[in-house]
Amino acid sequence: MKIFLDTANIESIRKFNDMGLLDGITTNPSLLSKEGRNPKEGMKEITEIIKGDVSLEVVSTDYMGMITEGKRLREYGNNVVVKVPMTSDGLKACKTLSSDGIPVNVTLIFSPNQALLAAKSGAKYVSPFIGRLDDIGQNGMNLIAEIKTIFSNYDFKTEILVASVRHPIHVVDAAKIGADVVTLPPAVLDKMLKHPLTDIGLNSFLEDWKKLHEKTGIDI
Ligand code: G3P
């Protein structure tokens, strides 16, 4: 399963990229707004740091606007995936951009039928938002399982990019289902790294080594 970071924060991107963990990045207008800097500079910088796919989202809601913005976003780098919303115009833009060789991520997917239609329109990725379904009392992970079954039944090449991930258990469940990608807020990736027994074990190793060093005076 590929891991993307769901952020426009350069410091977090560098931190996890330096660990070799990142296959790509997803951004959206809210994440760019959170950083509060020049969005063009921010988007360009991300496409330069990351070798894998970087999703950059259009903000037009009409077909022509999405095409114009999509082509402009693609100029930031060959790794740019244009993110369009799951609307009629978004699917039309997905079809055109995909036919022109520009990969598309259809975002704000909340039902299996929406995922099916986005795949039919030629999307490289569909982004089901599982956390927001959980928030309204539905089971977001069931949606991932349903999309996985549908895409497997018909051998769609479109990848399932699990978005709106809120905690590490979402990641384990998505991996068990066989989702292609999870996009993670930095805080979730941080939590995945940690286990209290790792910290306890490390402290104990270091204390024992210190005792041995005090006795022998020998370094590694
Ligand atoms: O990529 C966008 C998606 O992950 C949104 O997450 O937490 O705002 O529902 P959230």
Image (cartoon, grey):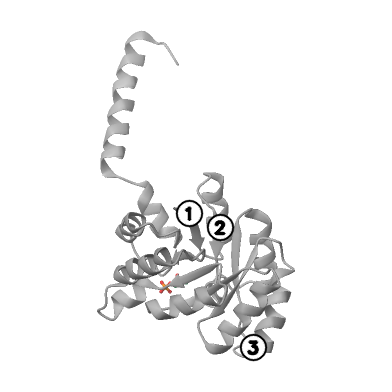
Cα–Cα span, label 2 and label 1: 8 Å
Query: Which three-letter amino acid code belongs to the residue tagged 3?
Result: Tyr
Q: Residues within 10 Å of mark 3 (few under 14, many from 20)?
A: some
Query: Which three-letter amino acid code belongs to the residue tagged 2?
Result: Gly
Query: Which three-letter amino acid code belongs to the residue tagged 1?
Result: Lys
Q: Which residue is mark 2?
A: 24
Residue 156: x percent and y percent? Answer: 49, 66
Residue 31: x percent and y percent? Answer: 52, 72
Residue located at (73% from left, 75% from top): 72
Residue furthest to the front in view is 154
Tell me the SS state at disc 2: strand
Comes first in the chain, label 3 or label 2: 2
Cα–Cα span, label 3 and label 2: 26 Å
Residue located at (57% from left, 52% from top): 14
> What numbered label is drawn on residue 2?
1
Residue depth check, mark 3 versus mark 2: number of the one nearer the observer: 3
Task: From the viewer's side, name the closer residue of 89 and 216.
Answer: 89
Q: Which residue is mark 3?
A: 63
Q: Which picture quadrant has residue 28? A: bottom right
Residue furthest to the top in view is 216
Tell me the SS state at disc 1: strand
Residue located at (55% from left, 69% from top): 27
Question: In screen coordinates, is 107 left or right of 37?
Answer: left
Q: Residues within 10 Å of mark 1 (few under 14, many from 20)?
A: some
